[in-house]
Image (cartoon, rainbow, N blue to C red):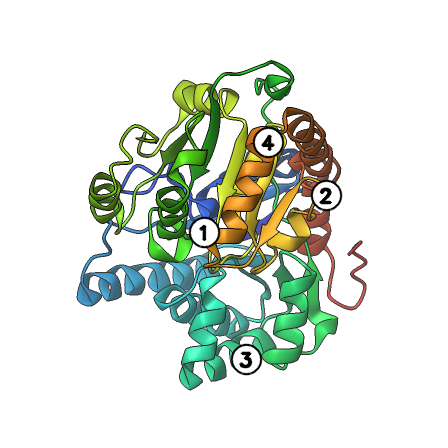
Amino acid sequence: MQNNKEKLSVIFVGGFRHSTPDGSYGGQIRACRTLIDSPISDYVKWIQIDTTMQSNPPPSIFIRLYYSVIRLLQLLIYLIFKEVNTVLIFSSSGYSAYEKGLMVFISKLFHKKVVLSFRSGHLQKDINDSDVMRWFVKKVIRKCDILICQSNYWKKYYGNIVGVNEEKIYIVKNWIKINENYNINKNIEDHNIVNVLYMSRISKSKGIYDLIYTVAKYRNEYTNCKFIICGKGPAYEDVQLLIRANNLEDIFLFEGWITGDKKLSIINNSHIFVLPSYFEGMPNSIIEAMSASLPIISTNVGAIPELVQNEINGFIVTPGNIDELHTSIIKLIKNRELRIKMGLNSRNRVINNHDISKMWVDIYEILLSNEKSMILKN
């Protein structure tokens, strides 16, 4: 291990708490903590600025502005008083994109190398819906030195739609620490009940309503399965009311946000993973489910088609199409051999493409090298 004097000094703007205020362990928090817990920290001295949301639902705009100003001042103090080589910024969508954009401009005033990573599929909707956001994001990306994208889809999006030179955009797929305690042989055993896992935020944009409408429409075909819903969100109570209104309480089981041994147990006892989302970047929940040898059913949005190869490790369906969703779920429920085959393909894909024990080197090369000399495998 190198000593601190030899380490690269990096201001890291991201989510670092153990969980968000509603008990979740969001994708950005997972990405940030997994990175700093990897061997890269033997070579990088991190100066952290935590941007985890203060409450959920989000606080008023005035409280958010207050905390934003605090973080901007924190960044300014670090830039003035600490020896810093690089600023690494993870950004979400909406208000987060504006705050992180200001951080990019401030960091460049101090002539620091800035590496930016947008990590929310909702930013695409923000850009499409708002000329101001579109203009701002273009300015921010042009100002930063390197933009990290999660997939080919997002590289093309920022290059073509946002109009940014693709030479400064690099692809680093989402990473996870692979849990060796996952039962990767669960689909090999015979099961009277097949468990279908949904593990994400409970909101309309995640497609949870489509899942319920699907089961309600084809209820008679789901007598030998359970849908395990893990997560919370703005639609949590409404979704439960909808399930009761359709007399589906015997099919759906709500677990809230899960962590630790409970999460391990639920994933180990699940046989199929479903996320019929409308907007995504590159969902860590899918990658984690793949690492646990689960076949995946999801939608053709964001980078999901680069995770889920249709009919190879799962099925890709059209957002909002409950008939397609039903057909895919039933195929896997009724075909144990197909679940085994797709689950194995899922796990191998994660090991080869998303293992942090290998991928931290790519991040380190980005932080260490300048843009012109940067060589990254895309």
Local packing at callout 2 (Cα closer than 10 Å; few below 14, some 14-19, many 20+) is: some
Are discs 2 and 1 less than 8 Å apart at CB?
no
Q: Which residue in the structure is indicated by mark 1?
A: 14
For marks 2 and 1, the one nearer the N-term is 1
Q: Which residue is mark 4?
A: 294
Placement of the N terminus among the 4 image quadrants = top right
Residue ID at (60%, 79%): 161
Q: Mark 3 or 4 closer to N-term?
A: 3
Determine whether label 1 and label 3 are within 8 Å by CB.
Answer: no
Are the residues tagged 3 and 4 within 8 Å (C-beta)? no
Q: Which is nearer the N-term, disc 2 or disc 4?
A: 4
Q: Earlier in the sequence, mark 2 or mark 3?
A: 3
Instruction: Say above or below: 49 vs 110.
Output: above
Q: Quadrant of residue 64?
A: bottom left
What is the secondary structure assignment of the residue under circle 2?
helix
Residue drawn 49% across the image and 20% down it = 269
Amino acid bearing label 1: Gly
Q: Which residue is mark 3?
A: 138
Q: Quadrant of residue 256?
A: top left
Query: In front: mark 2 or mark 3?
Result: 3
Which residue is at the front of the view, 234 or 190? Answer: 190
Earlier-in-chain disc, 1 versus 3: 1
Callout in the foreground (1, 3) = 3
* Mark 1 and mark 4 residues within 8 Å of each other at the beta carbon: no
Which one is closest to the eye, mark 3 or mark 4?
A: 4
Is residue 49 in view from this perspective? yes
**Seen in the image, is 147 located left or right of residue 330?**
right
State the mark number for residue 361.
2
Q: Which amino acid does the dot numbered 3 rest on?
A: Lys
Q: Secondary structure at mark 3?
A: helix
Front in this rendered view, residue 89 or 149: 149
Tell me which residue sits at (52%, 75%) in the image: 140
